[in-house]
Amino acid sequence: MRTTHLLYLHGFRSSPQSTKAQKMAALVRERHPAVHWWCPQLPASPKAALRMVFDEIAGWPQQPAYKSMAVIGSSLGGFYATAVAERTGCKAVLLNPAVEPARDLASYIGEQTTWHNADEHFFFEPRFVDELEAQHAGPLKAPENYLAVIAKGDEVLDWREMTARYPGAHIRLLEGGDHALSDFDAHVPEILDFLALA
């Protein structure tokens, strides 16, 4: 079954203006115009972010088991994408996915700025750490539904922890690289092949 609906979830302090999100949006627009693309600006609250996502995709084709939709998630968006894929059974592409964001983001409580607009501020509240803990998806039900692109050179997240989180998944482990996946273009063909876009 071909993917007709594609969701992209950005990372912490990121936005739909991220380089990877913009590149994927352009690729979908140019090569797969029939595919419904949605890359929302996620609220800072993990609970609110996932509620917004699930409210939207509830209107997407659901038979059989969301097989016509897929999700891409980068960093914290990878954590969210895992929650989406585990609940729906859809395919997921993870780009240096956050594995334990409740632990990692506890030190970011307070006022934050976004990467793409220094004038844009948001407050990361203490309760958001608990919300992240509550959204942890647990062991993978269908590892074959996942493609994870993981860079050993990630300066933010530990590649060993990322690979251990996704046993049995399709894993593209990069010897170097960085958290932003600056060489993203090199991985696009494999990502598109895995997604099987309509």
Image (cartoon, helix red, strand yellow):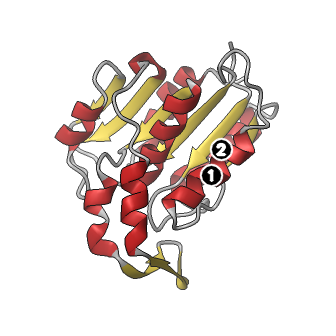
For image coordinates 77% across by 33% down, the residue present is 60
Residue 169 in which image quadrant = top left
Towards the viewer: 59 or 39: 59
Structural distance between the alpha carbons of marks 1 and 2: 5 Å
**Label 2 residue SS:** helix
| Residue type for callout 2 | Phe
- x then y, percent, for residue 164: 22, 32
Which quadrant is home to the N terminus? Answer: top right
Tell me: residue 91, above or below residue 56.
above
- Left or right: residue 134 versus residue 30 is left
Residue 182 visible within the image: no
40 relative to 196, above or below = below
- The residue that mark 1 highlights is 51
Q: Position of residue 43 (x, y in %)?
A: 58, 65
Which is more toward the observer, 48 or 151?
A: 48
Tell me, for residue 72, which label it has, or none: none
Query: Residue 41's spot in the image, x, y percent?
Result: 63, 62
Mark 1 touching mark 2, by CB under 8 A?
yes
Query: Could you say whether the residue bearing mark 1 is in a helix, strand or loop?
Result: helix
Q: Is residue 158 visible?
A: yes
Please provide percent x and percent y for residue 129.
36, 63
The image shows residue 178, relative to residue 30, as above or below, that is: below
Q: Which residue is mark 2?
A: 54
Amino acid residing under circle 1:
Arg
In the rendered view, does 80 fall on the left or right side of 132?
right
Q: Classify residue 91 by image quadrant.
A: top right
Task: Please tell me how crowded label 1 is: few (under 14), some (14-19), or many (20+) other residues with Cα within 10 Å.
Answer: few
Q: Residue at x 40, y 55 (%)?
A: 132
For image coordinates 36% across by 52% down, the residue present is: 133
Other residues around mark 2 within 10 Å, as few (<14) / some (14–19) / many (≥20)? some
> Where the C terminus falls, by quadrant?
top right
Instruction: Kindly identify the residue that appears in the image at 43 percent across and 38 percent down.
Output: 94
